Image (spheres, coloured by chain):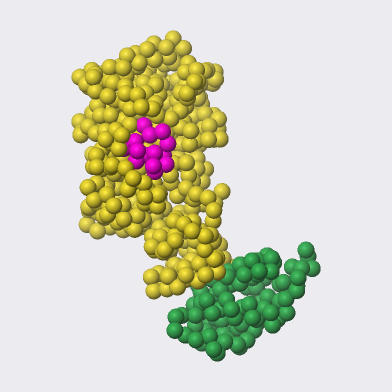
Chain colours: A yellow, B green
Amino acid sequence: MYDLSWLFERFRESRDQIFMIHAGEHFNYSWLLDRIQLRTEEYSAAGIKNGTVAALRGDYSPEIVAALLSLIELGAIIVPLSPAVGGDESQFMDIAEVDAVCTFAPGADTSPVRRSLEARHPLNLELRGRGNPGLVLFSSGSTGKSKGALHDFALLLEKFKVRRRKMITLTFLMIDHIGGINTLLHVLSNTGTVVVSKSRIPDEVCATIERNRVELLPTSPTFLNLLLVSEAYSRYDLSSLGLVTYGTEMMPKRTLDRVAEMLPHVTFQQTYGLSELGILRSKSEHSNSLWVKVGGEGFQTKIQDGTLWIKAQSAMLGYYNAPSPFDEDGWMNTGDAVETQGDYVRFLGRATEIINVGGLKVYPSEVEDALLEMTNVEDVTVSGEPHPITGNVVVARFNLREPEDFGSFKRRVREFCRGKLEAFKIPARIEVVEGDQFSARFKKMRRRT
Amino acid sequence: MKLSVQDCEGLIQEAYLLFLPQGSSGASISADTRLFGGDSILDSTALVSLLIEIEQQLNDTHHVEIVIADDRAMSQKRSPFRTIGSLAEYLAVLVAEKSEHS
């Protein structure tokens, strides 16, 4: 058994506090404690113990949180799988050598189903040897092949022993995402309240914030962009909201400026983390600024060739299905291109997404930022495409608010770009697309599938 | 589907107008207008954009799918991208070949 008594002690002190509001129902910490005990007994009886690899399927619910904490206590290696995983589920389970499957869906049987698979992967064996629980996170498919990262859960939990402010928090990022897990553990360790929104569409999220007086919304720039486009913020009382954190992808400056203008009482804070390293502590210069300090206890940072490198105490043991990304001193190249100003960094984009046009670098987000200023543009993604003359060309795919003649739109784009963007950054190919260009995790997809 | 060299020239001239800097007039555009190098007013990215625009136009209005800039174009003895006229000739050949094959 892994010792979670420090956490359970906090739950006991706050037993009447609401830990989760789900589907209109309130659940307190006393309920959670009872539930954890029941689950731990059930799972033990089913043979789940230290080193058992257990999948946790489902979206946020009181039951799945209780199950998660039970599995941590039992020292299991936990593979959360949210509905956003879709068709990759069985592949992920095979990669991590999942033996027990616990499903939490409305009406589903919650008892674990065994796959009778013995863990043989050296990483699983190594962690079992430590006697610590594990957490498996898969990198999103939007950046190519999904990689499974195994974490020592004990290391991830360490930072939550420091008490911080308790807040009513809406869980937006998924439970199988480092940001989602971080949010959940942050709220629980400070005995705050987790509010679950029925869906992640702007009106539903805003209604949930209004109804439950939500104070903290951790989200993605794509969602904030949708919030602006839908104007949902104007239909609900969001006065309880004090802090919005955003991460997982590049924030367009225009989106940040406009959302800060529409919600002047809210502090906007950039977050930064990776599924391989955990979430760093961060501090934005101010609400309207994309300059941010990242680091905090347990993290060292350095910039090499314009790219951010990190060494973390809470780093994963490794990938199941890819070579180790750490150098011999434990540093990892994040692949995030940055510029610096004193202690602050500004993210420019993924180094792999930089478009090389005739030897010159184009950052997709810079072009997207400019193009988002155009009237009738709802969203745009910019990517590269090989071309025999200049090596690559810039391609812009637009979502329009209203239908517009394609010829005159292209003319408008080119006129708009002149003087605003250097010639080599102006999209050579302009397309108008139907349908969303973001994933189920509300993250922009530049790669076409 | 067949396009004469004149048809292609007209199409290129029309697309070319889209890439002229503001204020410059299209009055002096002819088959001899340089597309790239020398006294051309297009830089390399504008040339590439122009070629892509012509491809899109051909596809949209004439339903012909061709790639203008490829290894073959790049390995021609004389670059087809010198002038509007030379590109028109090259384009007419590409379109004719395409219709033979389809």
| Nearest to the observer: residue B89 or residue A397 | A397
- Would you say A354 lies left or right of A170 here? right
* Position in image of residue A296 (x %, y %): 24, 42
Say above or below: A436 vs A412.
above
The residue located at (37%, 39%) in the rendering is: A205
Check the picture and name the quadrant holding the N terminus of chain A: top left
The residue located at (48%, 44%) in the rendering is: A439
Q: Is residue A234 visible?
A: yes
Residue most extreme to the bottom? B28
- Would you say A142 lies left or right of A327 here? right
Say above or below: A19 vs B95.
above
Instruction: Specify whether residue A205 is painted magenta.
Output: yes
Rendered image quadrant of residue B62: bottom right
Say above or below: B5 vs A58.
below
* Position in image of residue A172 (x %, y %): 37, 38
| Nearest to the observer: residue A319 or residue A84 | A84
Q: Is residue A155 visible?
A: no
| Nearest to the observer: residue B80 or residue A441 | A441
* Position in image of residue A9 (x %, y %): 23, 19
Instruction: Specify whether residue A284 is painted magenta.
Output: no
| Nearest to the observer: residue A202 or residue B96 | A202
Rendered image quadrant of residue A388: bottom right
- Would you say B96 lies left or right of A323 here? right
Q: Which residues are magenta?
A: A196-209
The residue located at (47%, 85%) in the rendering is: B24
* Position in image of residue B70 (x %, y %): 63, 68
The residue located at (28%, 17%) in the rendering is: A30
